[in-house]
Image: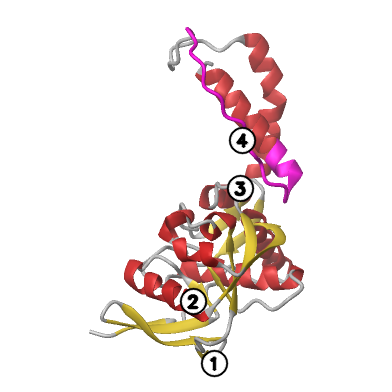
Amino acid sequence: MTRYFSRSASALLLVLSLASCQRPWVASPSLAETGIPVAGTVPADPEAEAMIAPYREQVTSKMEEIIGNAPVALGKGEYQSPLGNFVVDLLLEESRKLFGGQIDMATTTNGGLRVPIPLGAVKVGTIFELMPFENELVVLTLDGQTVQAFFDKAAKAKFAPIANATYTVKNGKAVDISIGGEPFDPARTYTLVTSDYLAGGGDNLSMFKNALKTEKVGLMMRDAIIRHIRQLTAQGKPLAADTASRVTLLP
């Protein structure tokens, strides 16, 4: 398959993704050898170019739509950051609107947040660059031992922003954990919303595979971000992250 046709397929997939909204895309990969060269010097086929042009225009139009404004850039960082806090907070807020039961916390990882949100106008394309994956939000019910293991991993790896919880890092472990403003109780269960990728043990969060229960929220992660930003804009609010400290580091 030529690069030209790869671009065409990508454009079609983006259109379908935008149209399907919250429906996850499932790839059907296959491998086969071809004798067609792939290079920038290969001229575009006029017939194929004409076929794909309307789809490219639709994708470009949708990606250029401005959905919000960031008065300051939101970037990533270790433990906690404006971008990490902004995303996990909105995941918790948007999931709580749809999920029938209680959700105590939310988390994601820096690896899943591909780019910062720059200063100024925020476009749909910005969010596709931030979150290019077709990840679905799920709520995990975790026992106390698994919750402790997650916080210890967050303390050690420094890459997992957390909403509605605070903790202190001491000797590489998480101590003085507070969830929802209350001290962590290892004898009870907690619920946490995250992506289906992380729920399956992605980014070395293998403890999530020990979840007592996994329930779908009914919302894709990228759609939650776009939806939340649209709501902020409709309310006349800019994008802003909670910068209150959530992680205390002891020397």
Task: Identify the residue position indicated by label 2 in the image.
Answer: 147
Mark 3–mark 2 Cα distance, whole angstroms, equals 26 Å
- Residue identifier under label 3: 134
Residue underneath mark 4:
27
Q: Quadrant of the N terminus?
A: top right
Amino acid beneath label 4:
Ala
Furthest residue to the left?
Answer: 251
Lower position in the chain sequence, tag 3 or tag 2: 3
- Looking at the image, residue 104 sits to the left or right of residue 153; the answer is right
Could you tell me which secondary element the residue under label 2 belongs to?
Answer: helix
Q: Determine whether, in the image, residue 130 is placed left or right of residue 193.
A: left
Is residue 27 in the magenta section? yes
Residue at 45% x, 62% y is 205
- Which numbered disc flags the more N-terminal residue, 3 or 4? 4
Q: Nearer the viewer, mark 1 or mark 2?
A: 2
Mark 4 → mark 2, Cα distance in angstroms: 32 Å
- Observer-side mark, 3 or 4, equals 4
Question: Is residue 234 shown above or below 35?
Answer: below
Magenta segment, which residues? 16-35
**Residue behind mark 1:** 182
**Which of label 3 and label 2 is nearer to you?**
2
> Which badge, 1 or 4, comes first in the chain's sequence?
4
In depth, the one of 156 and 248 nearer the eye is: 156
For disc 4, the neighbor class at 10 Å (few under 14, some 14 to 19, many from 20) is: few
Q: Is residue 223 left or right of residue 198?
A: right
